[in-house]
Image: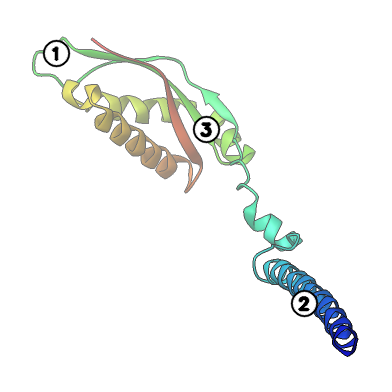
């Protein structure tokens, strides 16, 4: 009987040991999952963006479109040795502000003259290449800004461009 009495407490100790072990494993898992979640939250999760961050991420504002002036079509002889090549172009001017637009409306004959002088100085080869057209645009902008005042003309658009 003494052996049976001794074995009973050992069995109880084993049951109690298993419960303690199971309890420790559960606590370890809870700490591991909770600690990992907390570490993720503090290290990797982003907080809601501030107003300054939202402004930085916002796309840049659309550029303002200035007033337009559609000029009458230009038909000029190009600088060609045979003299049989010509250019027909419709040009629209975009201005920085209304003041520049008003000033240009008062000086249309001077604007037309400046454009005709530049167009007629170009060769067929210059007018047929994309680089030549871009150079022409920049030259016209410079010439018109010299005439109307610095930064008056924002851009020039060719709405028709025929070389023949």
Q: Nearer the viewer, mark 2 or mark 1?
A: 2
Give the alpha-carbon distance from disc 1 to disc 3, as whole Å.
Answer: 32 Å
The image position of residue 161, as x and y in percent, is 34, 17
Q: Pointer 2: residues within 10 angstroms few (<14), some, or many (20+)?
A: few
Res. 133 in view: yes
Q: Secondary structure at mark 1?
A: loop
Q: Is 2 above or below relative to 18?
A: below
Q: Secondary structure at mark 3?
A: strand
Q: Earlier in the sequence, mark 1 or mark 3?
A: 1
User: In percent of the image, x 24 and y 13: which residue is there?
Assistant: 86
Q: Earlier in the sequence, mark 3 or mark 2?
A: 2
Q: Residue furthest front?
A: 1
Q: Quadrant of the C terminus?
A: top left
Q: Is 80 above or below relative to 156?
A: above
Residue holding disc 2? 21
The part of the image, by quadrant, that contains residue 114 is: top left
Residue holding disc 1? 83
Q: Is 49 above or below relative to 34?
A: above
Q: Pointer 3: residues within 10 angstroms few (<14), some, or many (20+)?
A: many
Give the alpha-carbon distance from disc 3 to disc 2, as whole Å.
Answer: 82 Å
Residue holding disc 3? 94
The image position of residue 135, as x and y in percent, is 29, 36
- In this picture, residue 138 sits left or right of residue 48: left
Q: Secondary structure at mark 2?
A: helix
Cβ–Cβ under 8 Å for marks 3 and 2: no
Residue 103: image tag: none
The part of the image, by quadrant, that contains residue 131 is: top left
Give the alpha-carbon distance from disc 2 to disc 1, as whole Å.
Answer: 104 Å
Q: Nearer the viewer, residue 22 or 144?
A: 22
Q: Nearer the viewer, residue 41 or 14?
A: 14
User: In percent of the image, x 18 and y 20: which residue is there?
Assistant: 124
Res. 107 in view: no
């Amino acid at each position: 009987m003494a052996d049976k009495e001794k074995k009973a407490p050992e069995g109880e100790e084993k049951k109690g040991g298993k419960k303690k072990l199971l309890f420790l494993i559960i606590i370890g898992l809870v700490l591991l999952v909770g600690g990992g979640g907390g570490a993720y939250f503090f290290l990797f999760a982003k907080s809601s963006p501030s107003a300054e961050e939202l402004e930085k991420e916002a796309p840049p504002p659309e550029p303002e479109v200035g007033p337009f002036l559609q000029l009458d079509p230009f038909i000029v002889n190009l600088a060609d040795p045979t003299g049989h090549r010509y250019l027909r172009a419709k040009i629209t001017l975009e201005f920085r502000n209304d003041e520049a637009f008003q000033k240009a409306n008062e000086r249309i004959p001077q604007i037309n003259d400046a454009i005709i002088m530049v167009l007629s100085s170009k060769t067929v080869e210059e007018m047929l290449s994309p680089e030549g057209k871009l150079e022409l645009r920049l030259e016209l902008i410079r010439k018109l800004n010299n005439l109307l005042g610095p930064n008056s003309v924002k851009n020039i658009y060719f709405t028709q461009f025929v070389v023949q």
